[in-house]
């Protein structure tokens, strides 16, 4: 890996924040061309592209995403740790997967590919586009920061826009109006009383409030408050969340559903550690593949944070793991 470490830093020095990853994909088309692979580009439709590097006719596809969350953080290395945006989500995966492909190609193997998708962080638009234009393959190995454990299952997601409708009034005479902020408090209290059950595999259902907005001055009762309500669902709760939250609409509460992913079970292989994960990925959208593995270097606990990092030894372990996975899956096909 040491002789190829410059490649990793070249990747990390390119800002590929979601919707601006085209510069990065154009770089990779040239930089990852080893003269042995077939390179295909698939336009997503928003100015970004998906890339597929194939060595023969792929039966096993290594897959991860091109984009990162903002803000861009330039890379540094300290004591065997690489820090910077994308180091573990997901340029570390690109680096480890490409090295695995290179190792396999040097050993004369064929029948594998590296798929790099745009827009994972903002709605998996690349994955949704790719499944409509490509037949896929028997197996896809999706790279995300799982501590090099295979994900046995992942939580689903559901997103709703909630709007509370009040009546504006002078704050000195609150009895003359209806505060949308108080309606928000009532809504959240009601939500906390709902039992979504505990899943034996994925545990508790969780939710988060974002984009909370009310534009009233401090001395005026709010007549409108809106927010996003984002769920991480389980096999037990997914259908219930989709039914219950829209059912909370009334004359003062509007609910708009934005959908999301369902909880997903993944293929695991003997000899690899496995655990469930609570985060989302492109994997549920890749319905053109028969079986999916979710596994990669780095920790989800530092992804999307200012302290994002990955250990060099974990990148090497991931590379070795990907080579092993390919051989196991290839033997299962033949």
Image (cartoon, rainbow, N blue to C red):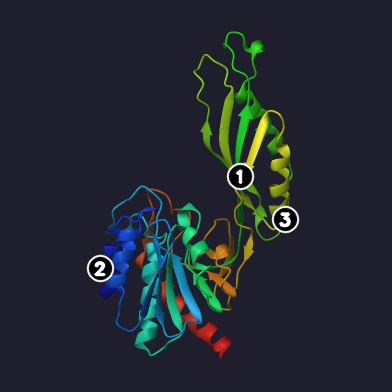
Task: Name the foreground residue: 310 vs 233.
Answer: 233
Q: Earlier in the sequence, mark 2 or mark 3?
A: 2
Label 2 residue SS: helix
Q: Which residue is mark 2?
A: 6
**Residue count near mark 1 (Cα–Cα under 10 Å), binned few <14, some 14–19, many ≥20:** some
Q: Which residue is mark 3?
A: 236
Q: Residue at x 48, y 76 (%)?
A: 61
Q: Earlier in the sequence, mark 3 or mark 1?
A: 1
Q: Residue at x 43, y 59 (%)?
A: 45
Q: How far apart, in angstroms, are the residues tagged by discs 3 and 1?
A: 15 Å
Q: Residue at x 40, y 60 (%)?
A: 88
Looking at the image, can residue 288 be seen?
A: yes
Label 3 residue SS: loop
Mark seen at residue 207: 1
**Residue count near mark 2 (Cα–Cα under 10 Å), binned few <14, some 14–19, many ≥20:** few
Is residue 68 positioned above or below 291 on the image?
Answer: above
Q: Position of residue 17 (x, y in %)?
A: 37, 53
């Amino acid at each position: 890996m040491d002789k190829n470490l410059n490649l990793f830093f070249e990747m990390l020095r390119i800002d590929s924040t979601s919707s601006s990853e085209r510069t990065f994909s154009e770089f990779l088309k040239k930089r990852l061309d080893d003269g042995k692979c077939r390179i295909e580009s698939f336009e997503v439709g928003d100015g970004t592209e998906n890339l597929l590097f194939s060595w023969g006719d792929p039966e096993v596809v290594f897959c991860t995403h091109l984009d990162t969350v903002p803000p861009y953080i330039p890379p540094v290395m300290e004591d065997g740790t690489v820090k910077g945006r994308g180091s573990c989500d997901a340029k570390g995966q690109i680096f480890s997967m490409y090295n695995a492909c290179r190792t396999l190609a040097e050993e004369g193997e064929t029948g594998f590919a590296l798929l790099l998708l745009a827009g994972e962080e903002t709605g998996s638009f690349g994955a949704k586009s790719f499944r409509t234009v490509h037949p896929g393959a028997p197996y896809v190995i999706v790279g995300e920061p799982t501590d090099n454990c295979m994900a046995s299952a992942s939580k689903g997601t559901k997103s709703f826009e909630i709007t509370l409708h009040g009546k504006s009034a002078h704050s000195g005479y609150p009895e003359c109006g209806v505060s949308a902020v108080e309606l928000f408090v009532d809504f959240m209290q009601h939500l906390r009383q709902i039992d979504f059950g505990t899943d034996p595999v994925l545990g508790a259902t969780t939710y988060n409030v974002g984009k909370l907005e009310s534009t009233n001055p401090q001395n005026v009762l709010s007549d409108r408050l809106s927010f996003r309500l984002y769920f991480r669902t389980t096999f037990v709760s997914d259908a219930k969340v989709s039914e219950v939250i829209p059912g909370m609409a009334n004359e003062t509460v509007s609910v708009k559903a934005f959908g999301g992913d369902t909880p997903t079970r993944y293929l695991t292989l003997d000899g690899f550690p496995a655990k469930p994960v609570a985060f989302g990925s492109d994997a549920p959208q890749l319905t053109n593949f028969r079986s999916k593995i979710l596994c990669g270097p780095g920790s989800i606990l530092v992804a999307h944070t200012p302290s994002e990092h990955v250990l060099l030894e974990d990148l090497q372990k991931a590379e070795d793991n990907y080579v092993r996975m390919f051989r196991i899956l290839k033997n299962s096909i033949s």
